[in-house]
């Protein structure tokens, strides 16, 4: 019964996120508060702009993580295959959705060694919720999640707001930091910690850095609102009203990114949460990100085919390349130093 409930929850999430008229998010990412200074004389060859970036022990062709999207529903098999095909074709990183159902109930739905065979040359990231690694089987779950897809790293996702609003959600979050520290010590691969759309504040980022986390995804507000998603799933009006009050809760992605970068100058950072195109991606890198992540923006394409996912990310990558060119930057390292000006509302620049 619990297995069926978890699978139905995953199916509900897919249905809601795939429907643009449901769970509408009203909070802004903050990327539109910034504008690049245009360079009218770039003195560059556009095609020679270097977008490669290191990612742990591998190198990506572009600074893009296909972010954790779905796990546990049967139709996730095709989605994960399409995403892996695109990651391999384009040389991008891929994070899988939560492996909880696969570990607890054996329903893997594409989260298995086949994924590594589809994408042998790119980073694959396993994924577990913080509540799962805190339990008695936490270390075993973490090891098995990595082994299941021959992962290069493990993502631990933090979603306290979603769990608080979800009927049957994990409400006791005591000991999570210690559990993360234990997993960091025990695993042979790096641990990445991410939020799911409410952002990570500098104080939390510093706690994660202190226990040895290898990378942080700030995953700020401005993309999918999981509070609004849970409001759509709420079985009663009272639960819906509680959830909807938090639909615009969180730290906007650009703000979370800037503040965490200031607090942790050397920590590898991923910016996700409402990154809509390659210009947002360029702004994220200039604000301190090493990679950018997309999930909901590509989900409909992933539901269709691998070719559709490839076309989507080719567009984003070309937009990023042009943004580098028109700021006079021949590489991502140069883009980090590109002039990025605050936008004054109501004033033309």
Image (tube, rainbow, N blue to C red):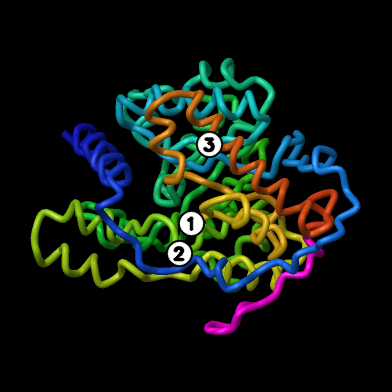
Task: Say if residue 45 shows up in the picture.
Answer: yes
Q: From mark 3 to mark 1, how far is it between C-alphas? A: 15 Å
Placement of 246 over or under 101, stated as above or below: below
Determine whether the residue tagged by mark 3 lies in a helix, strand or loop.
helix
Nearer to me, 225 or 117: 225
| Residue topped by disc 2 | 221
Crowd rating for badge 2 (residues with CA inside 10 Å; few <14, some 14–19, many 20+): many
Sequence-wise first label, 3 or 1: 1
Determine whether the residue tagged by mark 2 lies in a helix, strand or loop.
loop
Nearer to me, 320 or 129: 320
| Residue span colored magenta | 336-349
Q: Are the residues flagged by discs 2 and 1 in contact, CB closer than 8 Å?
A: yes
Sequence-wise first label, 3 or 2: 2
In the figure, residue 149 lies in which quadrant? top right
Q: Are the residues flagged by discs 3 and 1 in contact, CB closer than 8 Å?
A: no
Nearer to me, 284 or 160: 284
Nearer to me, 22 or 257: 22
| Residue topped by disc 3 | 312
| Residue topped by disc 1 | 274
Residue displayed at 39% across by 27% down: 304
List x then y, in percent, for residue 327: 78, 59
Sequence-wise first label, 2 or 1: 2
List x then y, in percent, for residue 85: 55, 22
**Which numbered mark, 2 or 1, is in the foreground of this view?**
1
Crowd rating for badge 1 (residues with CA inside 10 Å; few <14, some 14–19, many 20+): many
Residue displayed at 82% across by 42% down: 50
Relative to 213, 161 lies left or right? left
Residue 346 among magenta residues: yes
Q: From mark 2 to mark 1, how far is it between C-alphas? A: 7 Å
Relative to 338, 241 lies left or right? left
Residue displayed at 76% across by 66% down: 265
């Amino acid at each position: 019964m619990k297995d069926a409930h978890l699978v139905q929850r995953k199916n509900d999430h897919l249905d809601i996120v795939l429907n643009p008229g449901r769970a509408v998010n009203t909070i802004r990412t903050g990327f539109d508060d910034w504008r690049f200074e245009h360079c009218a004389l770039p003195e560059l060859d556009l095609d020679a702009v270097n977008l490669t970036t290191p990612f742990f022990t591998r190198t990506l062709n572009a600074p893009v993580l296909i972010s954790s999207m779905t796990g546990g529903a049967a139709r996730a098999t095709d989605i994960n295959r399409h995403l892996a095909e695109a990651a391999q074709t384009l040389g991008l990183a891929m994070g899988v959705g939560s492996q909880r159902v696969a570990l607890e109930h054996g329903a893997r739905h594409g989260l298995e060694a086949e994924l590594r065979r589809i994408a042998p040359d790119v980073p694959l990231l396993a994924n577990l919720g913080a509540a799962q690694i805190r339990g008695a089987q936490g270390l075993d779950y973490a090891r098995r999640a990595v082994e299941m897809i021959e992962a290069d790293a493990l993502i631990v996702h933090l979603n306290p707001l979603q769990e608080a609003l979800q009927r049957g959600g994990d409400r006791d979050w005591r000991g999570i930091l210690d559990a993360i520290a234990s997993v960091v010590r025990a695993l042979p691969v790096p641990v990445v910690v991410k939020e799911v759309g409410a952002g990570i504040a500098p104080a939390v980022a510093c706690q994660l850095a202190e226990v040895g986390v290898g990378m942080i995804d700030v995953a700020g507000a401005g993309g999918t609102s999981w509070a609004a998603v849970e409001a759509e799933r709420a079985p009663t009006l009272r639960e819906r009203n509680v959830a909807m009050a938090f639909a615009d809760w969180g730290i906007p992605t650009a703000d979370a990114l800037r503040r965490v970068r200031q607090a942790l100058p050397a920590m590898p950072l991923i910016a996700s949460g409402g990154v809509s195109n390659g210009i947002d991606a360029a702004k994220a890198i200039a604000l301190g990100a090493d990679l950018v992540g997309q999930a909901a923006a590509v989900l409909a394409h992933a539901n269709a085919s691998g070719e559709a996912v490839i076309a989507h990310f080719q567009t984003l990558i070309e937009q990023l390349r042009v943004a580098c060119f028109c700021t006079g930057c021949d590489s991502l390292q140069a883009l980090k130093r590109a002039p990025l000006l605050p936008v004054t509302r109501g004033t033309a620049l």
